[in-house]
Amino acid sequence: MTKVPTIARIWRGRTKPELADEYEANRAEGIPPLLKTALDVQLLREDREDETWFTTISYWADMESMTAFTKGDPEQVHHLERDAELLCELPERIQIHKIVVPPHLR
């Protein structure tokens, strides 16, 4: 398996500012399972005045490895246990992007 990511799987969701810290901890719980299979994972947070957005980006060697992890359709959203409670709405899709310029390898 290549160590260079060719696919990025991107999830985005938003919460109320007063729930943002709690949701950040909740979202971070979903990272370790991803790290067991994905090449890398990033959890991003954007605080706005009236909402906080979270973005999780996982990096994959190929579609096959990502599909094996998701056990089916890689665009299907797999919600965390507390997503319905903490998010403004449940995201309905995942974005899949082909990486055009890969990160520099050291």
Image: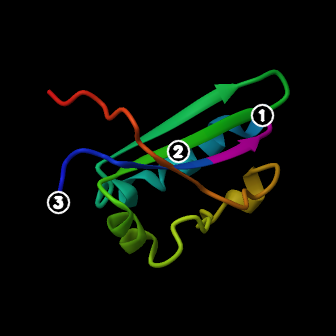
Query: Residues in magenta?
Result: 12-16
Is residue 15 inside the magenta stretch?
yes
Q: Residue furthest top?
A: 49
Q: Quick one: label 1, few (<14), some, or many (20+) residues within 10 Å? A: few
**Which kind of residue does numbered mark 2 sit on?**
Thr
**Residue at x-position 58% and y-position 64%:** 75
Residue at image mark 1: 18
N-term mark: 1 or 3: 3
From the image, which quarter does the N terminus lie in?
A: bottom left
**Which kind of residue does numbered mark 1 sit on?**
Glu
Secondary structure of the residue carrying tag 1 is helix
Is residue 11 inside the magenta stretch?
no
N-term mark: 2 or 3: 3
In this view, 8 is above or below 50 = below
Left or right: where does residue 42 sit relative to residue 56?
A: left
Mark 2 or mark 3, whichever is nearer to me: 3
Q: Are marks 2 and 3 in contact (CB under 8 Å)?
A: no
